[in-house]
């Protein structure tokens, strides 16, 4: 099934040379562009992707590319045809890049598979590498279909660094719901970024705690003494970006779900 055929119908930008060169300032775009750009087309990725605590890329893949700190000066020195940044790019940085003749494209935050596929279409249209986009989209869709769970969900607290919880309209929530987990925090009226203290968790425990991050209380020994409470670790880097991160996140959640029987 050609999932990206419609999105890739538009011609890529016409710059000198075979393909437009790109610098990415967005960690989620980094991971996608690393897979859908032609060799030599992606000149640099964001510095976030060089940090194992922040990167959604595999370390070996990130090591293939140089990185910038995101300043206009660094990017202009690389002389790319375009920059891919997030929607929060500072106006002054954007103005400096555009003033240097560099096209700026922005990407938003995705919250489900469809939005992630749309984002891939957007980036593939910039690279002109439709076949690479098809391959990535097919892998994501196959992983999604293989991970669907229709049994009773597990009451699950996804506890992130700082003791915060995700909202319902997030990629993390959709990944959990798709693989058989129900957000414990949402059922208690807690939205995106709400703080959930340890005491409240102990007073009203879920069936499962998924700890994402390095917050000390996430591994507090008292959690292990709550009857019926399971505790698992989940790499927080799997929760925020779509693209190639989705199959990895689904695989980990499927493994956790399988252990529940």
Image (cartoon, rainbow, N blue to C red):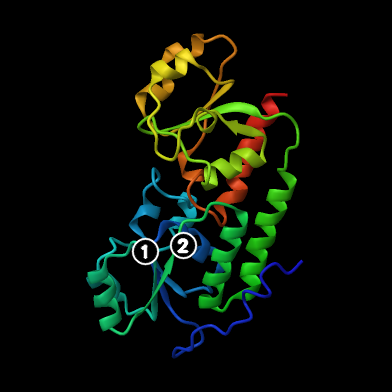
Residue 93 vs 64, above or below: the answer is: below
Crowd around label 1: few <14 · some 14–19 · many ≥20 (10 Å): many
- Report which residue position mark 2 lands on: 29
Q: Residue at x 57, y 28 (%)?
A: 156
Residue 63 vs 72, above or below: the answer is: above
Residue 150 vs 58, above or below: the answer is: above
Q: Quadrant of residue 70?
A: bottom left
- Report which residue position mark 1 lands on: 25
Relative to 96, is 6 on the left or the right?
Answer: right
Q: Is disc 2 placed on a helix, strand or loop?
A: helix
Q: Position of residue 29 (x, y in %)?
A: 46, 62
Relative to 185, is 84 on the left or the right?
Answer: left
Of the pair 131 and 110, the residue shown nearer to us: 110
Give the distance between the C-alpha atoms of the residues marked 2 and 1, in whole angstroms: 8 Å
Residue 113 vs 5, above or below: the answer is: above
Q: Is disc 1 placed on a helix, strand or loop?
A: loop
Q: Looking at the image, can residue 77 be seen?
A: no
Quarter holding the C terminus is top right
* Disc 2 + disc 1, Cβ < 8 Å: yes
Quarter holding the N terminus is bottom right
Q: Position of residue 200 (x, y in %)?
A: 42, 18
Q: Residue at x 36, y 29 (%)?
A: 215
Q: Quadrant of residue 251?
A: top right
Q: Looking at the image, can residue 55 be seen?
A: yes
Relative to 30, is 136 on the left or the right?
Answer: right
Q: Residue at x 71, y 43 (%)?
A: 147
């Amino acid at each position: 099934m050609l999932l990206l055929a419609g999105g890739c119908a538009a011609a890529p930008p016409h710059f000198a040379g075979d393909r437009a060169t790109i610098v990415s300032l967005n960690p989620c775009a980094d991971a996608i562009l690393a897979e859908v750009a032609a060799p030599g087309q992606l000149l640099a990725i964001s510095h976030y992707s060089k940090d194992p605590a922040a990167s959604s890329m595999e370390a070996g893949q990130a090591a293939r590319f140089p990185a910038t700190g995101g300043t206009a000066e660094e990017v202009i020195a690389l002389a790319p045809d375009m920059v891919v940044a997030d929607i929060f790019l500072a106006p002054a940085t954007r103005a400096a890049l555009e003033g240097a003749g560099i096209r700026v494209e922005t990407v938003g935050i995705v919250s489900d598979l469809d939005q992630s596929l749309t984002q891939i279409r957007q980036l593939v249209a910039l690279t002109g590498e439709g076949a690479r986009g098809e391959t990535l989209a097919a892998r994501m869709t196959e992983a999604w279909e293989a991970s669907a769970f229709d049994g009773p969900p597990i009451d699950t607290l996804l506890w992130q660094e700082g003791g915060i919880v995700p909202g319902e309209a997030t990629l993390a929530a959709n990944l959990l719901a798709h693989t058989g987990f129900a957000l414990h925090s949402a059922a208690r009226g807690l939205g995106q970024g709400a703080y959930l203290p340890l005491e409240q968790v102990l007073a009203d425990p879920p069936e499962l705690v998924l700890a994402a991050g390095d917050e000390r209380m996430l591994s507090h020994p008292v959690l292990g003494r709550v009857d019926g409470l399971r505790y698992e670790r989940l790499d927080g880097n799997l929760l925020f970006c779509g693209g190639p991160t989705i199959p990895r996140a689904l695989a980990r959640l499927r493994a956790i779900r399988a252990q529940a029987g």
